[in-house]
Image (cartoon, rainbow, N blue to C red):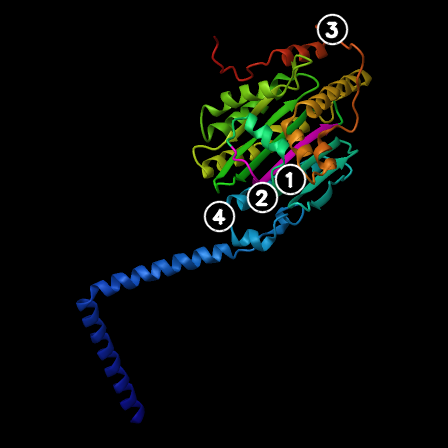
Amino acid sequence: MFRTIRQSFRAFGTIGVLQMRKKVNFRYPAAIVLGTGATIWWTTKRAHMDRRKQKLNLTNFMAIPITSVQQLEDNPEDMKTKMELMIMKIQADFCRALEAEEYAGQKFRIDRWERKEGGGGITCVLQDGEVFEKAGVNISVVSGNLPPGAVQQMRSRGKKLADGPLPFFAAGVSAVIHPRNPMVPTIHFNYRYFEVKDSTGEKQWWFGGGTDLTPYYLNDEDSIHFHRTLKAACDEHDSGYYLRFKKWCDEYFHIPHRKECRGIGGIFFDDIDEPSQEDSFAFVTSCAKSVIPSYLPLVQRHKNDAYGDLERTWQLLRRGRYVEFNLIYDRGTKFGLHTPGARFESILMSLPLTARWEYMHEPKASSREGQLMAVLKNPRDWLQIEQKP
């Protein structure tokens, strides 16, 4: 009986509460709206906080990031964070893709280094592989004050930098792959982000980079595939980018004293700061992700091709041209060598393991070597889309 009475009181109380809720809801609809809005706001905030607290998956990288993991996790929306994580992922993906092409299980040597002036880098080098004679894939994340030489170089490109100390941040990924087989081309790519703050407190930022191919023997199918892949990455963001940056590449990777290009080009750009920081970052990311599909099919297609002493000698001669450009003209090499605390081993990673210089060497125009030289002296429209004068 007592159980029945208690159940009756509970039922009566529940009915009363429901009736009160109905009255409140009817009389105070604004409270419902405000309450719902507050719930949505709090849920969104918590979701954002949860994202900020997400742990980085360090297995995605070749080594521990240069910036502290805690700082990266606490500042996910900072462009410095986004760029560092992007280049570290590109480095790891490319290194693992190259290792997969080796036969005897050669791996990259991983060298994480720090710079007392601020930041550091991760240098990954594979030497004496069966497929890759020397392959280097570097990332650097450095900060400090710009040295006078770097300031002068930037001002010569039109950068308006105030006098006084100029704190900077720079992050980039750079790779040069020198294959053993002369039928496999060399590839170079570099993608970077730069921030500088002048004495007035104004912050300037820009992106730069590019990907270019240096074959030892001309292969039209390879060249078209390479350029078509880069164009697809550019077209995701602006249909005019490819032609603009291909021309820039042909002009930049030119050896004036030889009156020839280093290779068959690709894309190259610098000082990109429009239409927005996010758009620029998305474009650079697309270009960096296009490296593997642009290059790995060429490695797989030719790494087992037959060659002899003639082809090997020609490869070493062309590597000599590569050295000349990198040491005399390359802007990135100059910036690195002028930066205090520079790590010269990493900067000069781009140089081949072996190269050759012969006095007054000139291939016959009708030879395969001569056919390559004709293209190096007159860059070709590989996709047949350039406007004729």
User: Along the polypeptide, which appears first: circle 4 or circle 3?
Assistant: 4
> CA gap, disc 1 to disc 4?
20 Å
Residue beneath disc 1: 139
Q: Nearer the viewer, residue 95 or 170?
A: 170
* Label 4 crowd (10 A; few <14 / some 14-19 / many >=20): few
Q: Residue furthest front?
A: 164
Q: Which mark is residue 77?
A: 4
Cα–Cα gap, marks 2 and 1: 9 Å
Give the number of the disc on residue 178.
none
Place of residue 107 in the rendered image (x, y in percent of width and height, measured from the top left): 74, 41
In percent of the image, x 73 and y 19: which residue is there? 318
Q: Residue 364 in the image: x percent, y percent?
A: 74, 6
Q: Are marks 2 and 1 in contact (CB under 8 Å)?
A: yes
Q: Kindly report the distance in space between the C-alpha atoms of the residues bearing marks 4 and 3.
A: 56 Å
Residue at 18% in and 67% down = 26
Earlier in the chain: of badge 1 and badge 3, it is 1
To which residue does mark 3 refer? 364
Displayed quadrant of residue 372:
top right
Q: Amino acid at mark 4?
A: Glu
For the record, the magenta segment spans: 161-179
The residues bearing labels 1 and 3 have C-alpha atoms spaced at a distance of 41 Å
Q: Is residue 293 visible?
A: no
Separation (CA) of disc 4 from disc 2: 12 Å
- Secondary structure, magenta segment, majority class: strand
